[in-house]
Amino acid sequence: MYFMTQISRDDLLRLAQLSSLELKETEIDGLMSDISNILGYVEKLNELDTDGVEPTYQVTGLKNVWRGDEEINYGVTREELLARAPESVENQIKVPKVL
Amino acid sequence: MTINEIKNRIKDGSSARSIVEDSINKLKANSDYNAAINLIEERSLKRADEVDGGKIQGKLAGVPFIAKDNFLAFGAPTTAASKMLKTFDAPLQATAIEKLEAEGAICIAKANLDAFAHGGSTENSAFGPTKNAFDKDRVAGGSSGGSAVVTALDIVPFALGSDTGGSIRQPASYNGVFGIKPTYGAVSRFGVVAMASSTDVVGLFAKTVEDVELIMDIMSGIDDKDMTTFPDYFKVEESVKPNQRIGLISEFMSSGVDKDVLDTVNNYADKLRSKGHIVEDVNLSMSEYALAMYYIITPAELSSNLARFDGVRYGYRAEDADDLTELYGKTRGEGFVTENKRRIMIGSYVLSSGFFDAYYLKAQKARTLLINQFDELFKTYDVLIGPTAPTPAFKLGENTTDPVKMYLNDIMTVPASLAGIPAINVPAGSNEQGLPIGVQLIGPMKADAQLLALAKSMEDVQA
């Protein structure tokens, strides 16, 4: 019942890179076949004629919901949020070098 | 035990503390089900004492409940059943929990789930699978498996869950309890770890319809922290509409469906007829494509939502990363389970340039066709019914090697999710082994209360 959408090892590693995911070697073969199978399954949609059909991105008809341009108090302080960062220095979150 | 029974016990002189202690002890005594990840002991006993001291009052004063562990709550980490958030201490609480606490309810624990709610069996939890309340060799269903099991085991009268494609209804079916996926936008999702934003809803599990109604009445309504919420439209229906036209979805009753499930649904249809309703076979041919839409749309949305877990601001951070790119990759590689990675990568694939039109746009157009079919049916029918899941609970490990097979268990629940319409699981029977079987009632937008009223009118004729 599945069509063939074969994901190669290179495709998979490219997807992992796009997704910022470092994969374990033991995960790679399984993910290759699983993702191929799933993409094969969803090709079923090609049986449908959707020419001229409007896509639905939002189901309850909402367009833009605006709020006043004012500060909302969530009851959380900067200190409380910084305390949750794995590493912080002088009120800033610390990360390893960017480049 | 129902909410009313607990309230009566308190009225008759029991302390809220003793009720909360009973629930906690019962949860501990049933730890082999692995239904909860963390207990909220200190905070819940303190709140119970405040109920007993008269400081906390409300419609749910002293009533214990359990929330799926993707709801931000005080008193224990909010893990989303992942290594990523294993020790995450929420700085605020989900609106749903705040509303319940404002009425005096007490959250005693956080329930197990598939990590980040990705799954249909609670086997993808980083804390091990939850076991079915009726057979410990079988799955709880998922992703809200822990919440379904603590309700079925009568540890608490109700438990909160989230439903993106069936994550409340399917485990409710597998564990013989009521479960509601409300209309999209009925209940605020603020403070719930986001999965797929266009279908995520907050709902609950309970033993009786009356309790579902009471909690829905409290939780629903507009929240300026979730821009998709409706002004409160949910109002408990005092009586059920007589002589309803009910459509039995033929596509859900095919030969591939378990015979006991078919019998249970047919039997429920007969009982509806005996109450004066008209039940007729209807076609929802687009339902055959719903799962394919779902496995494009939700990975796309969740891959975006899960981009925030990067080891920078909160949650897990991998060690020994030399630069920021490596920090992201290692943190996410170690913090997510394989099913999370599978879905994130599918999302990246279908959203990547060159594939967008073929997958994501195609799926969103197909979604319109599905919604059109529902709209057409609801011109004639008040309610649609069918099974909630094609089988009773399957064995642990039975579907873990084939994701497509696992996903097929959601085939009857994803259509209502994609359309944003309300659907509930009604426990309607069981097979010879005693495994529960559920019937699903699906209604038009905002018909949540009408579905519950119909289910309530049927409680006297239930198996």
Image: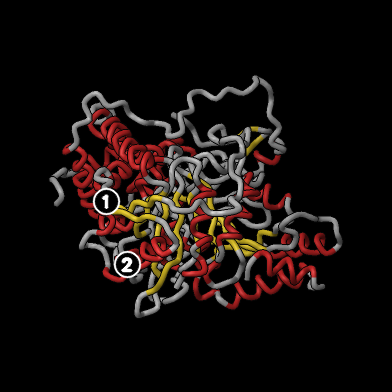
**Same subunit under labels 1 and 2?**
no
- Of the pair B262 and B142, the residue shown nearer to us: B262
| Quarter placement of the C terminus of chain B | bottom left
Q: Is residue B166 above or below residue A80?
A: below
Please, what is the three-letter code of the amino acid marked with disc 2? Answer: Val
Q: Position of residue B61 (x, y in %)?
A: 75, 59
Residue linked to disc 1: A31
Please, what is the three-letter code of the amino acid marked with disc 1? Answer: Leu
Tag 2: Cα neighbours inside 10 Å, few (<14), some, or many (≥20)?
many
- Pinpoint the chain carrying mark 1: A
Q: Is residue A79 above or below residue B240?
A: above
Can residue A76 be seen?
yes
| Quarter placement of the N terminus of chain B | bottom right
In the displayed structure, does residue A26 sit left or right of residue B385?
A: left
Which residue sits at x=26%, y=43%?
B286
Residue linked to disc 2: B261
Can residue B84 be seen?
no
